[in-house]
Amino acid sequence: MTEKVLKQKQLLRAKRKLRTRGKICGVANKPRVSVFKSNKYFYAQAINDEQGITLASVDGKKLGLSNNKEDAKKIANEFVNALKKANITEVVFDRNGYLYHGVVAAFADTLRENGIKL
């Protein structure tokens, strides 16, 4: 891709991120689950925005899992375990400017299947 196209894609993601972040906020009993995906790995964390602390997190790189749908489901299962240890059953999903498609959708669907309310 050319440099101009890459800058345009980054700008559009940043706009989507700010637009969604202005509407959602995580609290202690219903934290915000923020996801990040790089070209190789997938990360997620549950954040209490009132206090500015991370309640639970999962790192695909440390688990040795890459950024694809099958591994996103495995990462989501690990994240559900971390959420249950923190006694969290309901969250607000922050897709972090990414489209709700592919890896992000697979992660969110697996959270729902394991009893986490989004």
Image (tube, helix red, strand yellow):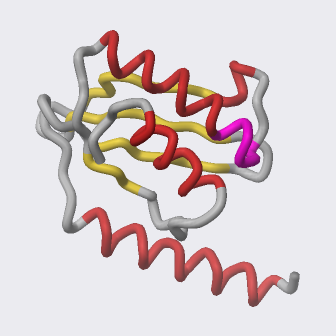
The residue furthest top is: 85
Q: The N terminus lies in which quarter of the figure?
A: bottom right
How far across and down, in percent of the image, does residue 105 sit? 54, 56
Say whether residue 57 is left or right of residue 8.
left
User: Where 40 sits versus 79, above or below?
Assistant: below
Given residues 53 and 27, the one toward you in this image is 27
Residue 112, quarter of picture: top left
Given residues 117 and 36, the one toward you in this image is 117
Residue 27, quarter of picture: top left
Residue 80, quarter of picture: top left
Is most of the magenta stretch helix, strand or loop? helix
Q: Which residue is drawn at the image coordinates 58% and 50% (left, top)?
A: 106
Q: Which residue is drawn at the image coordinates 53% and 82% (left, top)?
A: 12
Q: Which residue is drawn at the image coordinates 48% and 72% (left, top)?
A: 14
Say whether residue 67 is left or right of residue 73.
right
Q: Which residues are magenta?
A: 67-72
The residue furthest right is: 1
Q: How many marks?
A: 0
How far across and down, in percent of the image, does residue 46 sit? 34, 33
